Image (tube, coloured by chain):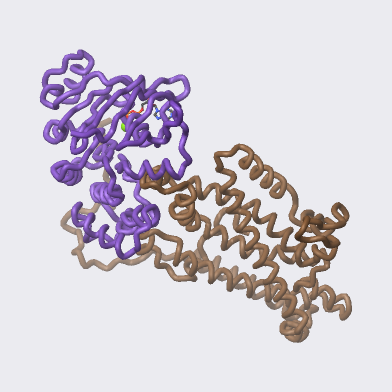
Amino acid sequence: MPHLPHSSPAALPLIDLPGPDVTVRRLRHPGRWVSGGIVLLLLAVIGRAFAVGQIQWTVVGQFLTAGVIVTGFGWTVLISACALALGVALGFAFGIMRLSENPILRFAAWLYVWVFRGTPVLLQLLIWFNIALVFPRLYIPGLIDERMVDVVTPFVAAVLGLGVNEGSYLTEVVRGGIGSVDRGQKEAAHTLGMTPGQTMRRIILPQTVRLILPVLGNSAIGMLKFSSLAATIAMGEMLNAAQRIYFINGAVIELLFVCAVWYLAGTTVLSIGQYYLERHFGRDAATATSDRRGFWAWARRPAARGEA
Amino acid sequence: MSLAVKAVGIRKSFGSHEVLKGLDLEVAYGEVLCILGPSGSGKSTFLRCINHLETPNGGYVWVDGAIMGYELNRGALQELPVKRLRAQQSQLGMVFQHFNLFAHRTVLGNVIEGPMVVRGLSRDEAEARAMGLLEQVGMAAKASSYPSQLSGGQKQRVAIARALAMEPRVMLFDEPTSALDPELVGEVLEVMRNLARGGTTMIVVTHEIGFAREVADRVVVMIDGEIREMGAPQQVLSDPGDPRVRSFLSRVLA
Ligand SMILES: Nc1ncnc2c1ncn2[C@@H]1O[C@H](COP(=O)(O)OP(=O)(O)OP(=O)(O)O)[C@@H](O)[C@H]1O
Ligand SMILES: [Mg+2]
């Protein structure tokens, strides 16, 4: 059978080609309208269910700005901030140790990560809180000599538990960040006469910070939420305050919703802050011009790996 | 002619692989020395041993009155603390094949880093001198650009300015044009030619035979971790005695 040239009934002879200004009609996507409609409908159903459900919305509104709750949220923010600061400090310290020339320092940093990343943070909180059972007194000659229970208050236990745990994650992040700055820049700094300390501070860490900034943003958001675990060690942060209230007045779900509103507000503010921080730091000039998307486009980006 | 650099019996092994087999070399002030040789012959390793980016396993390097990385103490070489080693290293400017510019610093920021941090110059003074150097390499107009915004040739010219900013005694170049597109090689060689004309002492590892022939006072050919030929460029390049050097040159000149 002879091989025929590829032709179909719709073959378009050159003579029929339209001019360059020919109208273009876009493909329609009826499927998108349908699926969008279904989702909207579902949202409406869920919304209505909560509106008519067994929730006293007035109580939610009432407790939203109650003194105890606001104070509790203050503690939540304070614990998160302190724990994050501690975590970042530990993360940098151990992250740098992890790449030290000294094998003992490297081992110590590995051990830290192994222990604190390998156990649940709730467990760590409980251990810190009960540390007085192991060491009844905190005694450092010439510096401090007190009963452990007076030193490790619920607040201190919460900050230590959350911060030390976070530090173990950030250690790995910092290590990765340092490792990703190419060796050549380090050698260039050495040939200019910069000491290892100067090279670390001025060449490597600034580039590391840029790389780990998105992770830090996620850490801050995660920390705000994980700080609620401190409710279990009698720390009077927001969730604990809410629990104490609903044990008395029985408005369980109302107070939990109050907390949800505050946590959402907090994480939203942090997300916005993260966006501006990243825009400020998170670039060398190459991305500076291209990455001018607005906050909302950024906020709806696919979640990063490991985002809490 | 006074000596700038004297390498004595440099040996270097990586594991069981002996890369440098006892190299001796002298470079005088104002001299331009080009090192040629096949890939893997140890040229980069030798250059990196000269400024102690690699510590030699044997032998030592004397630069301008001091032994790199050591102090002569009762007939033995006592290793120096890192700070003093770095001070010595800053006497040798190094230009790398892959530029190694600081990615988070502008062109100007790259050039002032060493003078400010290591030599303690004020920012104003460092910037004024840096602009002079950038002028010299034709990069003044790009002073506030970041490395990622530059072409390879531009990056390398900035890297040269950065090394010059430390006012080194000797400039070391490790294949400065090998990572460049062919049309960008010329601009970097031109800067180097001008440096040579200005009397800068230079040790240049290169595959640019034309450059070596034109600019070098002496040429060294390395093969398998040994110096097989050393002398004036026209002599070494046109009439090498060593048969392996001859076959290497016939390959690169072909
Ligand atoms: N850090 C290192 N660890 C192990 N082996 C190395 C290291 N650096 C270099 N070598 C080996 O030493 C030998 C010489 O390498 P070197 O880079 O000095 O060669 P070269 O003459 O500069 O080659 P080229 O022209 O390709 O740059 C090679 O066999 C290389 O694999
Ligand atoms: Mg090389």
Q: Which chain is purple?
A: B
Q: Which quadrant holds residue B149?
A: bottom left
* Image position of B227 (left or right of A33): left
Q: Nearer the viewer, residue A86 or A25?
A: A86
Residue A264 coordinates in the image, percent (x, y): 65, 72
Drawing shade for chain A: brown
Residue A84 visible in this rendered orientation of the protein:
yes
Task: Give the quarter of the figure containing the C terminus of chain A.
Answer: bottom right
Measured along the vertical axis of the image, is residue A253 above or below residue B199?
Answer: below
Residue B19 coordinates in the image, percent (x, y): 38, 23
Residue B155 visible in this rendered orientation of the protein:
no
Q: Which quadrant holds residue A24?
A: bottom left
Residue A62 coordinates in the image, percent (x, y): 75, 86
Measured along the vertical axis of the image, is residue B86 above or below residue B32?
Answer: below
Q: Residue at x 64, y 75 (%)?
A: A44
* Residue found at the very far front of the displayed protein: B74
Q: Residue at x 18, y 38 (%)?
A: B30
Task: Give the quarter of the figure containing the N terminus of chain A.
Answer: top left
Measured along the vertical axis of the image, is residue B158 above or below residue A151?
Answer: above
Q: Which residue is drawn at 79% across and 72% down?
A: A236
The number of callouts visible is 0
